Image (tube, grey):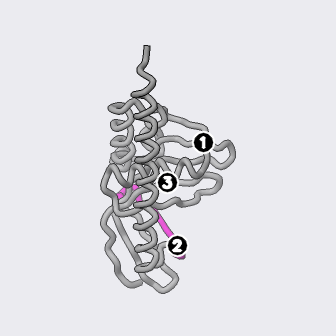
């Protein structure tokens, strides 16, 4: 029989970790938006080079190494982890795999289940968790038709167009 107090404690600790992850991501995003206008920028990912590029309306180009954490299907409200998505290059699955390893170690099913039914807010929480656990500099959600691609990125290099 499971020790419910331990399960509840683990559940609450995980919820706190998600909340901390979201707060940290909000702070990082605000700083990036103030510096290079993340919220107004166009984006593109090159899976061959493993980079994301953001181009602001003012001509600032921010490039960074990228990882694809997962995709969110807006038609059926499902999340597919990057480690399970055949369209994601293996080298860009590393952060998603680290989150899965955390889930395996701590018994968190939503981190080890390949496809989940969830909200877009839940997808942001999973991505913020990846950002925190993997020491990323930020996260981004890019639309691709009816799919939202959730990514983390590393150190940003700024140049002018």
- Disc 2 to disc 3, how far (Cα)? 15 Å
* Residues at marks 2 and 1 touching, judged by CB atoms closer than 8 Å: no
Extreme residue toward the right, this view: 75
Q: Residue at x 33, y 49 (%)?
A: 133
Question: Residue 123 versus residue 87: which sits nearer the camera?
Answer: 123
The residue beneath circle 3 is: 150
* Residue that label 2 marks: 39
Mark 3: secondary structure: strand
Q: Position of residue 153 (x, y in %)?
A: 37, 60
Residue that appears at 35% across and 81% down: 159
Between marks 1 and 3, how big is the CA–CA gap?
Answer: 14 Å
Give the secondary structure at mark 2. Answer: helix
Residue 49 shows in this picture: no
Q: Is residue 97 above or below residue 49?
A: above
- Neighbor class of circle 3 (other Cα within 10 Å; few <14, some 14-19, many 20+) is many
Residue 151's image quarter? bottom left
Pointer 2 or 3: first along the chain = 2
Q: Secondary structure at mark 1?
A: loop
Residue 111, visible in the rendered structure? yes
Which part of the image, by quadrant, shows the C terminus? bottom left
Query: Mark 1 sits on what residue?
Result: 118
Crowd class of label 2 (few under 14; some 14 to 19; many from 20; radius 10 Å): some
Residue 70 spot, x, y in % from top left: 48, 47
Q: Is residue 143 magenta?
A: no
Range of the magenta residues?
39-50
Query: Which of the two discs, 1 and 3, sits closer to the camera?
Result: 1
Crowd rating for badge 1 (residues with CA inside 10 Å; few <14, some 14–19, many 20+)? some
N-terminal of the pair, mark 1 or mark 3, is: 1
Horizontal arrangement in the rendering, residue 147 relative to residue 63 (left or right): right
In front of the other: 49 or 160: 160
């Amino acid at each position: 029989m499971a020790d419910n107090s331990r399960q509840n404690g683990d559940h609450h600790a995980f919820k706190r970790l998600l909340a901390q992850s979201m707060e940290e991501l909000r702070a990082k995003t605000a700083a990036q938006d103030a510096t290079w206008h993340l919220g107004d920028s166009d984006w593109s990912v090159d899976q061959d080079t493993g980079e994301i590029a953001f181009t602001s309306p003012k001509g600032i180009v921010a490039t960074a190494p990228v990882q694809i954490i997962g995709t969110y299907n807006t038609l059926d409200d499902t999340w597919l982890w990057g480690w399970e998505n055949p369209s994601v290059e293996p080298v860009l699955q590393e952060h998603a795999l680290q989150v899965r390893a955390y889930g395996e170690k701590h018994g968190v099913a939503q981190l080890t289940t390949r496809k989940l039914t969830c909200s877009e807010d839940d997808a942001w929480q999973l991505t913020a968790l990846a950002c925190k656990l993997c020491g990323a500099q930020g996260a981004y959600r890019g639309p691709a038709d009816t799919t939202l691609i959730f990514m983390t990125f590393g150190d940003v290099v700024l140049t002018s167009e």
